[in-house]
Image (tube, rainbow, N blue to C red):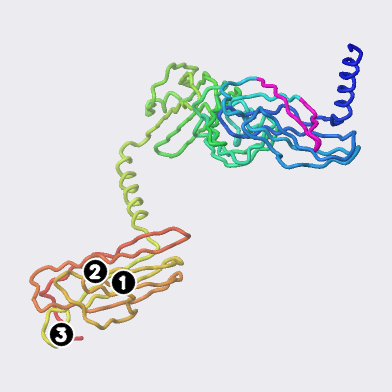
Amino acid sequence: MKKYIISFFLLLTATQLILAVDLNVEKLSSNEVMILGADEPAVFNLDITNNGETDSFIIYTFFGSGYSPREEFTILQHKTKNIQFKVSPPYDLSRTGANAFDYYIQGKDGTKYTGRLNVQVIELKDAFEIGSNEINPETSSIEIYIKNKVNLDFEELDAKFSSAFFELEKIFSLSPKETKTFEIILNKEEFKQLNAGFYTIKAEIDTLNKTANVEGVIKFAEKGIINTDVEERGFIIRKEIITKTNNGNTAEIVETEINKNIISRLFTSFAPQPDNTERQGAKIIYKWNRELKPGEKLEVKSKTNWFLPLIFVILIVAVIVFIKEYTKTNLKITKKTIFVKSKGGEFALKISLLVHAKEQLDNVIVIDRIPLMLKLYDKFGGETPVRVDEKNKKIEWEFKRLEPGEKRMMSYVAYSKIGVIGKFALPRTASIYERAGKINETQSNKVFFITEQRKSEF
């Protein structure tokens, strides 16, 4: 009886071996991960070789909350098929770390191959690495990078990079193990006061309906840069300005010297006062010593005034030059008015405008206003206005382009049945125009009228 039982079990084992699927499975991928709190599947790249007869198979697991492919696939005898086996994280996944699970490849007869796969569960921030190249105070651009450290495809990333040197937002995709770089133009004014050292670069990354904060390092290399700028101007009043600027990123001791003789020193003043004075024969040496931090500067001014009485004259000349420069315009508007006698005996004024372009001007708009008590006569001399706003007492002329030296004449009559006694003032005529891509404004002279002057007919 015992022999029969042993024979039965041997026969059963042999039958199972005959019925079992004969497969070789090679995993081509590595470092598969699942993101904690995200429903993104891990992807396993498997090469499945069928050592038996042609058969149809399904692959599945009880580990995750979902998997694919779910449809059957056929592998011919002695052939190999590549399968991407995607496994979604389990619903109860709550901590990071390594996980191992079984998967099954089942043939049409119900027999199956059992394999084992490993997956690493990580936080989203652990999937990325960010950093940059080394920079120094003379660097005009920086190249930053973001690296996908895992075997997971991020189809859309919204990354906001920030540091003491720049800010940048980019939307992009990142394939498994891919590294992307971005070049950023730097504004040196924004970090000219920073010391050398290591600075943090941060990235706020939004993907898979989650947000991760990743940090990296920027090396701000030491570089000592002291720039000296000397400005000299004037003859009777001699001014000298020596500016030393620390454009590096380390503190530096700087020394400034100014030499004067025994005569010029009598008429020279300094700002700030020198730290040290030395005499070598007829030469006087003034010295300033300062420690400048990054971005700081030392400005030493000296002024030698040979003829103090001329200061007042120079100031007057400077004021005149300033006024001339201030009143200089590319478009001149000359406004004139005369009193005219209307047929009905009403009080009337004839206003004339002469527009003179000194340079080529585009899109010229001339706007004139008349006092509220006056009405506008419906006939115009010279250029015809494009808009007349009787309600708001406003008249507008437009010129698409005026060439250098071109002049345009305009005139109109404003009248009132109520007389005006005494001095009468009209508003200035305004103009808006475009020159070299910039918008400019100008106004005419102010016009006054006294009713007692002689009248003329029109």
Q: Which percent across, then down, holds residue 36?
A: 58, 27
Residue 373, by quadrant, is bottom left
- SS class of the residue under badge 2? strand
Are dots 1 and 3 in contact, CB under 8 Å?
Answer: no
Q: Is residue 140 magenta?
A: no
Q: Which percent across, then down, holds residue 251?
A: 52, 19
In the rendered structure, the answer to whether residue 13 lies left or right of residue 137 reads right
Residue 4, by quadrant, is top right
Placement of the C terminus among the 4 image quadrants: bottom left
Q: Which residue is mark 2?
A: 369
Q: Which residue is mark 1?
A: 396
Q: Residues within 10 Å of mark 2 (few under 14, many from 20)?
A: some
* Mark 2 vs mark 3, CA separation in Å: 21 Å
Residue closer to the observer: 390 or 444: 390
* Mark 2 vs mark 1, CA separation in Å: 9 Å
Are dots 2 and 1 in contact, CB under 8 Å?
Answer: no
Read off the magenta span: 98-115
Sequence order check, earlier mark of 1 and 3:
3
- Res 272 label: none
Q: Which percent across, then down, holds residue 29?
A: 76, 31
Residue closer to the observer: 361 or 192: 192
In the rendered structure, the answer to whether residue 237 lies left or right of residue 205 reads left
| Residue lying at the far bottom of the rendered structure | 343
Q: Nearer the viewer, mark 1 or mark 3?
A: 1
Q: Is residue 104 magenta?
A: yes
Q: Is residue 419 above or below residue 221?
A: below
| Residue lying at the far top of the rendered structure | 2
Q: Nearer the viewer, mark 2 or mark 3?
A: 2
Q: Which residue is mark 3?
A: 342
Sequence order check, earlier mark of 2 and 3:
3
Q: Which percent across, then down, holds residue 321?
A: 36, 51
In the rendered structure, the answer to whether residue 65 lies left or right of residue 58 reads left
